[in-house]
Image (cartoon, rainbow, N blue to C red):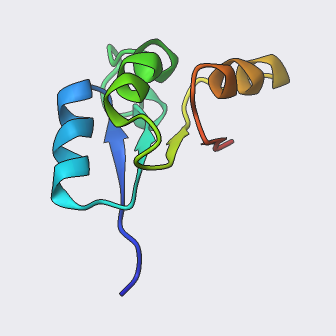
Amino acid sequence: SLPIWLKGILHPDDARMALNAGIQGIIVSNHGARQLDTAIPPILVLPHIVDVIGDKLPIMIDSGIRRGTDVFKAIALGASAVLI
C-alpha cells in the first residue's frame, strides 16, 4: 500500500512507461553522474518529461542542483519539488 516512486528517469519514453505502469511519482535523476560520467544533466530533459507526464504525476528532480537559482529553474520547468 506504500506509494512507489521511480528514480533515474532521463528519457520521456521511460516516464511514459512509468506512468502506464501505475507509478505514483518519478524522480528525474542521473544519480549525481556517479554511475555514468557521461549521463545527461537532468535539467535538460526535465521539460520533455513534463510534456509527457503533465500533471498526472508529481515530478521531482535531483542531480546538478548547486545553488538556489537551480531550484527556481527546475520549478519553472515543471518540477513539483527539488531534492538536494
Relative image position of residue 47 (x, y in whole percent): 45, 18
Relative image position of residue 10 (x, y in whole percent): 31, 28
**36 vs 61: above or below:** above
User: At 17% across and 57% down in the image, what residue appears?
Assistant: 21
Residue 16 as seen in the image, left or right of residue 69 = left
Quarter of the N terminus within the rendering: bottom left
User: At 42% across and 34% down in the image, what residue appears?
Assistant: 54
**Residue 28 lies in quadrant:** top left
**Residue 40 lies in quadrant:** top left
Relative image position of residue 64 (x, y in whole percent): 59, 23
Residue 54 as seen in the image, left or right of residue 23 = right
Quarter of the C terminus within the rendering: top right
User: At 37% across and 18% down in the image, what residue appears?
Assistant: 48
**2 vs 65: above or below:** below
In the current view of this chain or complex, which residue is farthest to the bottom?
1
**59 vs 43: above or below:** below
Residue 31 as seen in the image, left or right of residue 74 = left
Front-lying residue, 48 or 36: 48
